[in-house]
Amino acid sequence: MHRISDSRGFSSVELMIALSLLSVLIGIGFLSTMTLQRRDRDTKRMNDIDAIHKNVESYFAKKAFYPTLDAINSKVWLKENLPLLDYDSLRDPLGTEQKLAGKPAGNVYSYAVTAADGAGCDNVTVMCKKYTLTAVKQESGKFYAKSNIN
């Protein structure tokens, strides 16, 4: 006679397989979420750089020179001269300060402004005629940059 065993639950092997599959699915979901967050931050970086670029070009159209780094980092100056630029646009999504740096770096936007010949400028003795705005993308590590159009 053949006897059927009385089984009321899962075996330990079945439970281990189920937990392993669940762990893999949770891991994939976590990695997908992290990738989406990095992409969202990169999109914000590009939008911020585009907004700063448009406002700086608008300023140039009125004044015929670009603002200095010190000027653009001044909240008071920004409010008076670039009122359409949201002050929060100066802060990288992972950054801590709402200031542009002079050189590209991670978690901070940069604004390198120079005279027409590439030398330093102060808009008093030497007018600022060129600039490059840069953000470092988190997803690829590549630069997203905008330069003067004039």
Image (tube, rainbow, N blue to C red):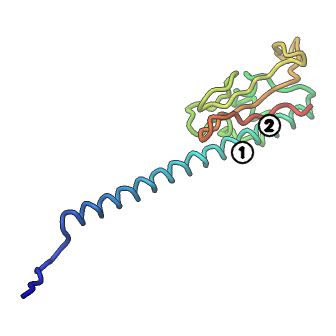
Where residue 138 sits: x, y (%)? 59, 38
Element carrying mark 1:
helix
| Left or right of residue 149: residue 78 | left
Where residue 129 sits: x, y (%)? 88, 23
Element carrying mark 2:
helix
Residue occupying the point 72% across, 36% down: 144
Q: Is residue 132 above or below residue 11?
A: above
Residue occupying the point 71% across, 42% down: 46
Where residue 97 sits: x, y (%)? 59, 30
Picture disc at residue 53: 2
Where residue 54 sits: x, y (%)? 82, 40
| Left or right of residue 139: residue 65 | right
The quarter in which the N terminus is drawn is: bottom left
Could you tell which of marks 1 and 2 lies nearer the N-terminus? 1
Q: Is residue 130 above or below residue 59?
A: above
Give the amino acid at mark 2. Answer: His
Give the amino acid at mark 1. Answer: Asn
Number of numbered tags placed on the structure image: 2
Task: State the residue in front, 136 or 72.
Answer: 136
Question: Residues under labels 1 and 2: Cα distance?
Answer: 10 Å
Picture disc at residue 87: none
Task: State the residue in front, 3 or 68.
Answer: 3
Residue occupying the point 67% across, 26% down: 104
The quarter in which the C terminus is drawn is: top right
Residue occupying the point 67% across, 41% down: 45
Q: Kindly indicate the quadrant of the structure image that contains residue 86.
A: top right
Residue at numbered disc 1? 47
Q: Badge 2: how crowded within 10 Å, few (<14), some, or many (20+)? A: many
